[in-house]
Amino acid sequence: MLQYILNQILFFITLGFVLFLPGYFLLLAVFGKSQIITVLEKFILSFGLSIISVDFIFFIFSKAHLAITLPSSLLGIALFSTACLGIYKFKTSNTGIAASLKNHDDKLFNFSKNQFILILLLLFLTVFIKVAYLSDTVYPTATDMGHHMYWAKWMVENHALPTYDGMPDFIIGEHIIFGVIALLSGASFFSAFPIIVLLLINLISILTVFILVLRLTKQKNIAILTLLFLGVLYAISSPQAKFVSGGVVGNIIGNLFLPLTFYFYYRAFSFFEQDRLPDNSSRTFLALAVFSTFGLFYTHHLTAFIFLFITALFLLIFLAFNFSRLKKVFRAIFRVVLSPPVLITFALGLIFFFFVFTPTYISGSAVGTAVGEPSKDTRAGLTIANLRASIGEARIAFGFVGMILLAWTLRRRSFGHILLFSWAAMILIMSTLPNLLMVNLPSSRIGNYLSYPLAILSAYAVYFVFTLSKNKKFPLLVLVGFVTLLAFVFVDGLKDSAMAFKKKENLSPIAQTFNASDYLSQNTTASDMLLKDHNYITADSWIKLFLMRGYKYPLSRGYFKRYDDTTKPREMCTLQMIASPASPEAQTCFQETGTNFIMVNPTSDSAQFKKLSNFDQVYSASQINIYYRK
Amino acid sequence: MHSLNQAQKIILFITLLFAAGAVYLFAIDTRYNNPAYNQDWFSLSFSNPQAENMNFVIENFTSQSDFRWEALAGKEKLADGAIQVAPGNKKEITVDINNRTAERLTIRVSSGKDGMQEIYKNIK
């Protein structure tokens, strides 16, 4: 028991050390004692900046060929944090810098008693619903999570950053924090730790949206309503708790980095809203925005791709609104961009990106395949019905109302509103009309990103209607209709949360998969080749974490529909070796692949092996059989 | 608590909420990893799948300890026995079978209500 408690304490200390301290000290180094960002913002922003800082620390390790071990990781993060602290101490000894930046935002972050209680209540419900759902899915089963944790474990075992064998679908920023946390805390990849880390990132992403909305709209009630629409309503559906339990690591971190990056860009250019000239803080915020952008590109190419499109639409709208004073606008932009902190950050980012550690998707074909005519039906765009299913009917309705209202208020100075509008509009276009932009990516994956801006727009719509009704600008009938719609939002949004309290699933199939995997890890060597089935074996993607013999080890019989691809020929060996092991095709496959162990579900795939005299059944449990081919 | 400002109270609240949630998830996870949870199955395997001997291992994830095993050459019983394996434990059983006439040697293990498992090696 004492050991369990000590392990828990060590895990939480590690979380703080890896996911909070580096970012916090970085903010201290950058802003000194300035209160230009409030205590709450500093706390929330520290997490995202920590993840990016830790990534960059280990890129240096990789370039310098330093082994990633417990002491070296500890030292690397501690050195970075200490250096930031040193800069902070140096800066604060120079009182001029600290005094020049004063806090003008006390009022914005000062909530009334009712607002404060509401914030705490919404935060409680957000965490409660998510934890209740995750308590049933905490056991490691998700396919994506298995794939990602393989690379994190690879990093721990090989003391280096993974190179992914050139596979462009994995990006380094998705795995470093998991590897480092496992290394420092000793937490098992088969424990709840990966899900807890993703839950933390998910919660921080919601809080980041909260402070972003507070800054963009200057309306506390809209920010609080955003907590309701993003945190409490639809708390389970994708990309919320379901993505956490499913180990959709890139999306979860991407949904933190996207608002984080927007936050810094907004703070850098918010001087446009006040029609004033940029100051030093604009340059500092832009440098942090550039740093966050590189973090985004190092973590998830899809989110980065979406970010580029949103930025393009934003620039188009903003410059169109400011067409008559373009010269003035560009002069102000250049004053911020052409400054030492921004140029140095950008140059360092580029050096890291191309010379220190280049993401695999740059050298791979991922970029090329993401642009062009949609190559599959699933990439041809979502219908409104599809969107309703993925975002939630009520949130879609309110989001659209919010988008129309927001579009109505857009003015040349409304930098923040244009950003918010571009965020929602671009993802909507990318997911429903990908042809228009030559986007060749799964539309549903892009559509998942819509829930964040639509939650903000829903909050905006509710706030707008109630504010106008307070001023008696709406007829009573419209207000009654709106309140009815709001009731529908709650019912629809909370219906999703009912999933959090579903019946517990039987866990013995998972335990059997792990037991059989452990058996194979002890009774086979790398010269043996295993083939397992993905269709009927639970948690099969975690088998490779027991064996650690390469990402593509063991071979896997995939979903049956994958073998029916009319567009290109697929390898059929993994199908034939299980479906008809005695066939001449399968015999050739056995020879070519060297497969000598087969792991299948006895109910679905056992009879064909029992008939053959060259297959021994060497392991048996109710959900798993293992056959050995002589 | 009164000396804290609103921002600090929100930070403290979210930190405690997250910590409580994480501790709860770890506790659930520990319970799932406990062999005493989901006590409804056992595994049967050869000690060495690639060797010719028929030694086997029973790994018990049921709630009871009593198992019966038998070694068969085709349908003929060559040996049998009873063995106790405590829940959450495993035990290796050594069997010496010299029947080289049968095509298939089978080990069959049963455990009352938790069913029966069998494994085999083909001789010819």
Image (cartoon, coloured by chain):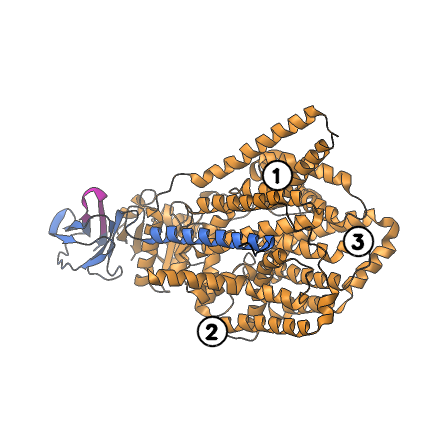
What's the residue type where badge 3 is placed?
A: Phe
Location of mark 1 (residue):
A382
User: Mark 2 Cα within 10 Å, few/some/many (few <14, many 20+)?
Assistant: few
Residue A282: horizontal and vertical position, in percent? Answer: 75, 61
Location of mark 3 (residue):
A272
Q: Which residues are magenta?
A: B109-119
Residue depth check, mark 3 versus mark 1: number of the one nearer the observer: 3
Q: In front: A86, or B47? A: A86
Check disc 3 and report its element: helix, strand or loop: helix
Check disc 1 and report its element: helix, strand or loop: loop
Mark 3 touches mark 1? (CB < 8 Å): no
Q: Is residue A559 visible?
A: no
What's the residue type where badge 1 is placed?
A: Leu
Q: In front: A62, or A468? A: A468
Relative vertical location of residue A512 with respect to residue A183 in this rendering, above or below: above
- Report which quarter residue A270 is drawn in: bottom right
Q: Which chain is orange?
A: A
Q: Residue at x 41, y 58 (%)?
A: A544
Location of mark 2 (residue):
A71
Relative vertical location of residue A110 with respect to residue A393 in this rendering, above or below: below
Q: CA distance from mark 3 to mark 1?
A: 36 Å
